[in-house]
Image (cartoon, helix red, strand yellow):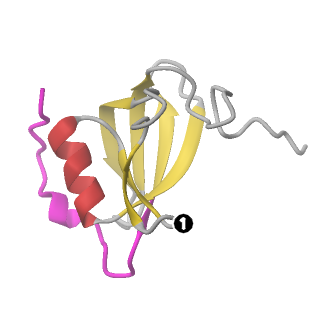
């Protein structure tokens, strides 16, 4: 199912380059990861309901889970008040972190 959004995707402010994307588990609200998107990755995310990022290290579009199978299915998508950060609530199919952890945020400091 493709989303019928009440606003144009152009509302995301890509004027400064890549835009951060925070991903939370749809059911638990646990923060799963932080990635970055560009216009192409953002469009693919909206078109497919699977989370796409722009990989800064590989300098290319990246579908989360394309090699591991641990994809993130988009359930809800939000923009912050400045339209320069995206929050995605997703249903993870398997662990999100490449280490096998549920979340990339498993190293508690305090």
Q: Residue at x 12, y 57 (%)?
A: 8
Q: Which residues are magenta?
A: 1-20
Q: Nearer the viewer, residue 60 or 91?
A: 60
Question: Residue, x 43% and y 27% (percent of image)?
Answer: 69
Q: Secondary structure at mark 1?
A: loop
Relative vertical location of residue 26 with respect to residue 51 in this rendering, above or below: above
Q: Above or below — where is 93 with respect to 35? A: above
In the rendered image, residue 6, in percent from the top left (x then y), is placed at 11, 46
Residue at the farthest bottom position: 16
What percent of the width, then of the height, locates residue 33? Answer: 57, 43
Residue 72 as seen in the image, left or right of residue 14? right
Q: Position of residue 30 (x, y in %)?
A: 59, 29
Q: Nearer the viewer, residue 3 or 62?
A: 62
Q: Is residue 66 above or below residue 29?
A: below
- Residue at 31% across, 34% down: 76
What predominant SS class does the magenta segment belong to? loop
Please rate how many residues cluster around mark 1, counting C-alpha atoms within 10 Å: few if below 14, some from 14 to 19, many from 20. few
In the picture provided, is 3 more to the left or to the right than 52? left
Residue 110 relative to residue 38: left or right: right
Q: Pointer 1: what residue? A: 57
Residue in view at x 17 percent, y 65 percent: 10
Residue 8 painted magenta: yes
Residue 104, quarter of picture:
top right
């Amino acid at each position: 199912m493709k989303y019928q959004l009440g606003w144009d995707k152009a509302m995301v402010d890509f004027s400064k380059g890549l835009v951060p994307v925070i991903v939370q588990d749809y059911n638990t609200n646990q923060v799963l990861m932080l990635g970055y998107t560009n216009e192409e990755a953002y469009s693919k995310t909206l078109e497919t309901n699977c989370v796409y990022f722009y990989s800064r290290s590989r300098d290319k579009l990246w579908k989360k889970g394309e090699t591991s199978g641990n994809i993130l299915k988009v359930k809800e998508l939000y923009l912050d008040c400045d339209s320069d950060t995206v929050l995605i609530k997703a249903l993870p199919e398997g662990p999100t972190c490449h280490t096998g952890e549920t979340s990339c945020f498993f190293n508690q400091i305090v």
